[in-house]
Image (spheres, rainbow, N blue to C red):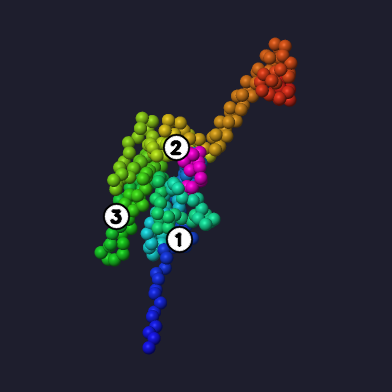
Amino acid sequence: MTQSLDPTIVPPAFPDHTQLPESDGTFVKNFQEHPQSILLTDSLESTLQTLHPDGQYAIGQDSGIYWRETDPPERGAEAPDWFYVPNVPPQLDGQYRRSYVLWREYTAPFVAIELASGDGSEERDKTPLSRLPEGGNQKPGKFWVYEQIIRIPYYAIYVIKTHELEVYHWVDGRYHRLEPNDRHHYAIATMGVELGVWSGSYQNQTQQWLRWWDNQGNLLLTGSELAKLERQRADRAEQTQREAIPKLLSMGLSIEQVAQALSLSVEDVERLR
């Protein structure tokens, strides 16, 4: 007599980034979040290219980090306003990242930044994940998730209203609040950068912004700031040449000799004279 065996029932695999919600449907809480996130990313580009010449890193902006499987799925995610993950591909299988799924990649973000619209209490919430007496789970606080579950090495909270910046470093299983250096910046030594508050104009807003500096205290510039600086240098060089040409010509040099002396073409000398 042949006995038939029921096929083994295999539980479904944990979902990946294409199978999880990319938004929880909430609004961005203030108009500063978007330009602030762009500013942080843009000014850090050259540093990240140096740290990752192979291009293996990812930047998230208000994107979900899934750390546990729940129903609904978004209850198992936190979405920092800005975060950086080293040594991971910027895309997965040729697709843009919809979210960052820890159980699929195992690499934690290295830096997470929250831009607090309120007083920062939500971002400092240390409520642990626990079972409620009436059933279900207590939603854990952001701080607890970042510290105890995801274990992000550097966590920064910037309170927009007061311009207060707090930076925490994960050591020996918990966060320790860092003290600012003499420049009032917070050093992230592994990356060779410092994080601090800068007063100035970006896009069409003049206010306090989070900015990066190198470990020598030099402000890391955005692409547009670098281009503006280069234009100013070129303008100064051209003005110097423009002033030098009549002086050299008055000394009896020919246009060809002036061009050679100033490393210009004859056409440029004619244009600038």
Secondary structure type for disc 1:
loop
Q: Quadrant of residue 137?
A: bottom left
Q: Position of residue 99 (x, y in %)?
A: 46, 55
Q: CA distance from mark 1 to mark 3?
A: 25 Å
Residue hosting label 1? 16
Q: What segment carries the magenta color?
A: 46-60
- Residue 35 visible: no
Front label number (1 vs 2): 1
Q: Is residue 8 magenta?
A: no
The residue lying furthest to the bottom in this view is 1
Q: How many marks?
A: 3
Q: Where 135 falls versus 58 (above or below)?
A: below
In-image side of 1 versus 235 (left or right): left
| Front residue of this view, candidates 132 and 27 | 132
Q: Amino acid at mark 2?
A: Trp
Q: Where 176 falls versus 128 (above or below)?
A: above
Secondary structure type for disc 2:
strand
Residue hosting label 2? 212
Residue hosting label 3? 128
